[in-house]
Image (cartoon, rainbow, N blue to C red):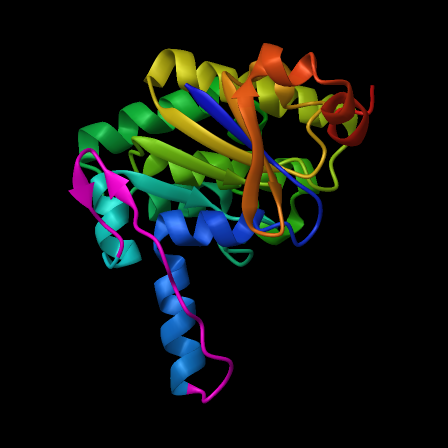
């Protein structure tokens, strides 16, 4: 299914994604080595009955928990095809080829751009590449951190249709965060509203759409 996580700036959306993917452990270690702010982690994370709270991000990726980070973060000096191949480092040759074909199916614009450097792509093209690169890692859970940021309504709609196809055709569970829920809510099965790092409301798409306060604050309706 697709789970949406919505909230204003600094609500904790990216922090949640860093915690789920294990990157928060890397950030905490880096801060400690630099003598900076201490980061305290509480709670636990379980995946398929396995406790993964202290598992490194690389180990989580091998389990199938893959993050597509905010602001794309592609390799700008590598070509589109090179970026995709880098993403497939965990896959077999057969898996990589099959997934590459799927990426080009849902993002046909990347076919003509496959030899272009990532730094010369538009924002929408970079986001397609970032999602494609994440798919190459063979995710079982795909974490999309604010994938619609700064994109046109047309590009947002196209990316949400592609996200729906990823769920339906690849049988991948998806967690997607966004500040503005309106373009995302049509494709989610369930959603959470975050405020100050806590989930203050949750429900199905229909339940949240029936809440007038949520509709006004997050859906612009």
Q: Is residue 79 above or below residue 143?
A: below
Does residue 170 belong to the magenta stretch?
no
Query: Which residue is more in the foreground, 120 or 188?
Result: 188
- Residue at 31% of width from left, 34% of height from top? 139
Query: Which residue is more in the foreground, 142 or 72?
Result: 142
Q: Which residues make up the magenta segment?
A: 34-53
Residue 220 visible in image: yes
Magenta span dominant secondary structure? loop
Residue 149 placement: quadrant: top right
Please state the total of marks drawn on the protein image: 0
- Quadrant that contains the N terminus: top left
**Residue 179, percent from left and from top:** 69, 39
**Residue 117, percent from left and from top:** 56, 50
Q: Please indicate whether residue 13 sits to the left or right of residue 23 in the image.
A: right
**Residue 63, percent from left and from top:** 21, 41
Does residue 44 belong to the magenta stretch?
yes
- Residue at 21% of width from left, 45% of height from top? 62
Q: Is residue 203 above or below residue 34?
A: above
Q: Please indicate whether residue 98 sits to the left or right of residue 203 in the image.
A: left
Residue 87 placement: quadrant: top left
Residue 113 visible in image: no
Q: Is residue 44 above or below residue 209?
A: below
Query: Which residue is more in the foreground, 59 or 87?
Result: 59
Residue 133 placement: quadrant: top left
Q: Please indicate whether residue 100 sits to the left or right of residue 11 in the image.
A: left
**Residue 207, percent from left and from top:** 60, 13
- Quadrant that contains the C terminus: top right
- Residue at 76% of width from left, 21% of height from top? 215
């Amino acid at each position: 299914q697709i789970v949406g996580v919505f909230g204003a700036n600094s609500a904790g959306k990216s922090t949640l994604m860093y915690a789920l993917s294990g990157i928060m452990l890397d950030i905490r270690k880096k801060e400690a080595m630099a003598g900076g702010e201490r980061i305290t982690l509480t709670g636990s994370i379980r995946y398929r009955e396995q406790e993964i709270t202290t598992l490194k991000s690389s180990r989580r990726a091998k389990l199938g928990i893959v993050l597509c980070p905010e602001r794309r973060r592609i390799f700008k000096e590598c070509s589109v095809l090179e970026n995709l191949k880098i993403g497939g480092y965990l896959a077999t040759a057969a898996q990589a080829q099959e997934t590459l074909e799927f990426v080009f199916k849902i993002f046909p614009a990347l076919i003509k751009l496959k030899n272009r450097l990532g730094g010369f792509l538009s924002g929408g093209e970079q986001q397609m590449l970032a999602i494609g690169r994440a798919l190459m890692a063979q995710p079982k859970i795909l974490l999309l951190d604010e994938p619609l940021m700064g994109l046109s309504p047309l590009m947002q709609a196209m990316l949400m249709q592609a996200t729906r196809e990823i769920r339906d055709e690849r049988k991948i569970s998806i967690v997607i965060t966004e500040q503005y829920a309106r373009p995302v809510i049509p494709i989610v099965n369930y959603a959470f509203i975050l405020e100050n790092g806590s989930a203050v409301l949750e429900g199905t798409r229909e339940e949240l759409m029936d809440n007038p306060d949520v509709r006004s604050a997050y859906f612009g309706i």
